[in-house]
Image (cartoon, coloured by chain):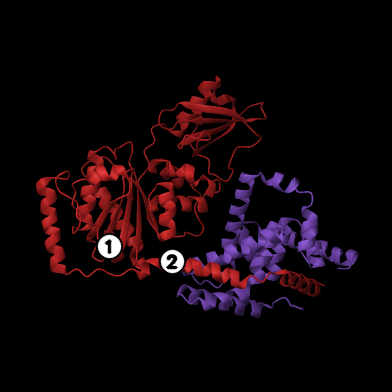
Chain colours: A purple, B red
Amino acid sequence: MIVFALTTEEIQDKNDRIEELLSLISDGDTASMGLLYDLIKTDVFAYALSKTGNKLDADDVMQDTFVKIYKYAKQYKPKGKPMAWIITIELNLIRRRFQLKSRTVGFDESFANTPSRENVEEKIINNAFLRELLKTLNEEEREVISLHIVSGMKHREIAKLLQKPLSTVLSKYNRAIKKLQLVVKEKNV
Amino acid sequence: MNHKLKNKIQTAYESETPDNRERILSACENEIQVATFSDTQKKPKWSMLFRRLVSVATCLILFGVGLFVGQIIPAPSEPVQTAETRVYLDVNPSLELALDKDNVVLSCTPSNTDAETLLNGMKLEGVELKTALNAIVGAMYVNGYLSSEDNSMLISVDSTNENNTNDFLTYITNQVNEVFTNSEMECAIIAQAVQTDETLRQRADEQGISVGKLYLLDKMVDSIDFITKEDISELAGMSIKDLNLLYSAKPEEEIKPSGEVISGTVNVKVPTEDAVITVLTEVGKTADDVEEYRVYLLPSKHGDKKVVYVVSIKFNNDDEWYRYEVDYQTGEIIQNEEEPNKPPHDNHPPKDGFDD
C-alpha cells in the first residue's frame, strides 16, 4: 500500500470533515462514528504507538480514545483544530495508563524484567521500517514525528499541545528525521 | 528528501494500524446506552393544582408538627420511572430525592441507616425541592451530621434535562447554603451532574455507597494520577470530607467530563504550616535545616481509610527524602518512613505557606 503524506489543503479538508463528524456524533448519529474511525484511525494509533512503544498498549489506548471521543463529542467546540482535542484526550489516557502501570508494578521494573519484550515486539510489528523507527527514535522524537507527519499538525501546534518551546519541537523533529534517513540508508528498510 | 521519507513513515503506520472498527464501535454503543438511559424515563403527570395542594398541605405538616414526628408513616415511594430528576445527597446520611419536572419531590429514599433515622417521620413527597432541602439539611445540622467542623456535602444530580444542569447545580447549592444564612457556617459542596444506570447502581450497592459517591470516585480515578480503580474500595470507606479534600486538590482537568459546581472550603483544623512544624519538632530540626519540602493531602498508607497530610521533607546535607503522615484534624504524626530519592507524585501541586 502506498500512502502519501497530506498537503496543507488536504489537512484542512480533513479537519473540517472531523469537525463535521464530531457535530453529527454529538447529535447522536452513531454511523458517523464509523466514518470518524476510518478517517483518523491511523492518527490515533500512530500517536499511541509513538508514546507507548508497543502495539498491545497502543491497541488498547486506541479503543479507549475512540470511546472517549464518542462520549464527549458534545463538549468539542469547533476551532478548526480537532486533532489537538483528540490528541489531548489520548495523551490523558496514556498518562493515566502508565500511572496505573507504575503503581501496579513499577514502571521501569515492568519493562526491565521482560527480557523477551523486544523479541515479542518484533514479532508483533510487521513493518520492518516501523520496527526500526521504534527502536531508533526515543519517545519524544516519535511523538513529534507522528503528530507532524501522520496527523499533519504544524510544529507550532505541536509545541502548544505538548507545552514545549517551538525550538525544542523543531530540533527533535530534525534530529528524528536525520536518524531515520540513516536507518533507511544503512539498514535498507 | 523528505517527501519520500514522510511517505514511508505514513505508509508504515498505516499498514500497521489494526482493524478494530467493529470492536470499537461496539464499545461506543455501550457508552451511548449509559448516556441515554435517563432519556427513556417517563415524565410524571401531576396537575399543577394537585401539586400545589399537596405542597401546601405538606408544608403545613412540616411546620406544624416539626421535622421529627415519628408517628407519621412515610408514604410509599413513587415508581422510579416517573422521575425527571434525581438528586443524591451525601453527608454521611445518604439519600435520594426523585423530582418531577417542576422540582416537586416524588419520593425520598434513604440509602443508609443514618438516612433512615434522619428521615424517620418526615413526609416530603409532594413538597417543593426548596422546602425538602430546608427540612433535610436542617435535620442534618440539628443531628450533628453537619457542623462547622464537618461541613462537606456531595450533591449529585441526574436529570433528563441536561441543558440546564449547571444552573440546577448552582441553584441547589445556593438552596443548601441558604439554610445557614443566619449562622457563620458555610457548606463545602461538590455538586456534580451524574448519569446513572443499572451498572453504576449495582456497583454502588456492592460497595455499600450511594451512586453519587461512586460517581465521584470514578471521576477521581479519571482525574487524579495516583488514584486507580483498585483504590475505590478503600476510598468508598472515606468520609465525604476526606474525599472533598482529595478532589479539591486535584490538578485542573483539561476536559471536564460533566457539569460540576464546587463551592465553600473544607474546614481543616491543622493548617499546612503546622503540619511541617510538627514534623520538625518531632525530628528536632528547625526551618534552617530544611533544604526542600512538599505537603500533600493523600490517602493514608496505613489502611485507615482517611486522608492525611503527607509531608515529604529533605534536610540539608542529606540525600534522602523523609515521609511523614500527619493527621489534619489532630496534628499528630501518624507514622514516618524514609523515602526513596524523590517525593511522591511530582505532578501533585505542593502546598504553599511555610516561611521561616
Mark 2 burial class by Cα count in 10 Å: few <14, some 14-19, many 20+: some
* Residue A122: x %, y % from top left: 80, 60
Q: Secondary structure at mark 1?
A: loop
* Residue A81: x %, y % from top left: 57, 70
Residue that mark 1 sits on: B79
Name which quarter of the figure residue A53 lies in: bottom right
Locate residue B256 relative to residue B186 in the image: left or right.
Answer: right
Name which quarter of the figure residue B91 lies in: top left
Tag on residue B35?
A: 2
Mark 1 burial class by Cα count in 10 Å: few <14, some 14-19, many 20+: few
- Gap between marks 1 and 2 measured at Cα: 21 Å
Residue occupying image coordinates x 62% and y 61%: A61
Looking at the image, which is closer to me, B52 or B123?
B123
Relative height, residue B172 to residue B286 (above, below): below
Residue A175: tell me if it is visible.
Answer: no
Chain to which mark 1 belongs: B
Identify residue type, mark 1.
Pro
Identify residue type, mark 2.
Ala
Chain to which mark 2 belongs: B
Residue A91: tell me if it is visible.
Answer: yes
Locate residue B336 relative to residue B169 in the image: left or right.
Answer: right
